[in-house]
Image (cartoon, rainbow, N blue to C red):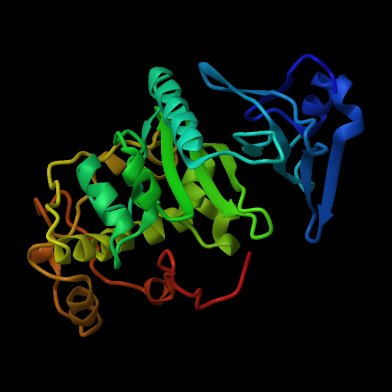
Amino acid sequence: MPEEPLYIELNMTAEEMYQRNPEYRAFQEADAQPMGVTFQGYNFPRYREPTVIIKYPNGTLSVDGVMSVLAYDDNKQENYQLSKINLGFLFNHEVSGISDKDAYSKMMSFFQELQDKGWIYSHSNDAPRLTAKDSFIFATTEGGSSNYLDYSYPLTFDEWMQLSDFQRWQLRYNTEAYMDIRINRQTDPSTGHRHYLISLDIYDELEEIKSNIDAKDRDRWQAAYSEVYPEIASWRLESESAAVKMGLKIQQDQPDYTLPLVLKETGIDTADFVSIDPYKITSKEFIERSDAGEDMTPYYENYSEKSKPDTTLSSRDNRRCLAGQPCPQSGY
């Protein structure tokens, strides 16, 4: 295995990635898919995993023990820039695995490094507006979701062990780069050894925007985002209704942030997002009354003519798949 780290940069082309790392040529792997898509990257043999340095706007991150590098490449676009890169790695390279306490310590150190580099919790549009502490309660209580756990919350070891074996954190660096961290905590039934598989996705603002849009509409994302944007408030109400039912306090003064690309291309300033008041109506009641044709504007927070929402929900909302629930429609 080469001694120097493998280098990747967000929004470089696949060709640039391979040219930048000639020492790793033997480990290149391109997996062609239907519809003109190829997953570009590297696959490394077990116990010979290298260090990868990934560069994002105004920063870099070094990750040890990377087993695989995977990036979506659109063959239909010339010189397509890799806008989302996945790294798969383990905290421990040994056959014996790692103890829960050591995995906890390594993850907390990793989180501290990210905080020191300026990464913050990325509350998505459908995330309940909770304190960092309450986000842990929401993540570990039946009826909540592990998708919205604020990574800056200082978990104790006992709380670490309460997390799902499939846990996710969402982060952002300003609005230029986004990161999803997933852990897959496994126990080898034949040996009892513990293993923590970490999946790290780093992606750009456009990928974050497209996550709100049906796959079939992503080539026309500007129009599609404008169409779906009025529905997002009902998505947030869905999670906040569950949080209120748990007795958690919604932080109604928690600000949203501007997505510069959305503002430039559609004129929508996402910082001006108007939520539905979860203390006035539940998600179920909102959908039922909206479908019946009722004017729902009295249930929005800080309502004004300037920020008047379109309260007509399309059939798309009825196809929304909640985290942990069966998906009602097939698709990529």
Q: Residue at x 67, y 53 (%)?
A: 191
Residue 53 is left or right of residue 118, and the answer is: right
Taking the view exactly as shown, the residue that stands out farthest to the right is 26
Residue 327 screen position, x and y as percent: 51, 73
Q: Quadrant of residue 294?
A: bottom left
Q: Nearer the viewer, residue 79 or 165?
A: 165
Residue 305 is left or right of residue 332, and the answer is: left
Residue 105 screen position, x and y as percent: 45, 30
Q: Quadrant of the C terminus?
A: bottom right
- Quick check: 105 above or below 130? above
Taking the view exactly as shown, the residue that stands out farthest to the front is 191
Residue 69 screen position, x and y as percent: 72, 37
Residue 71 is left or right of residue 42, and the answer is: left
- Quick check: 4 above or below 225? above
Q: Quadrant of residue 95?
A: top right
Q: Nearer the viewer, residue 229 or 222?
A: 229
- Quick check: 99 above or below 278? above
Q: Count of labels shown?
A: 0
Q: Residue at x 70, y 28 (%)?
A: 12
Q: Nearer the viewer, residue 100 or 138?
A: 100
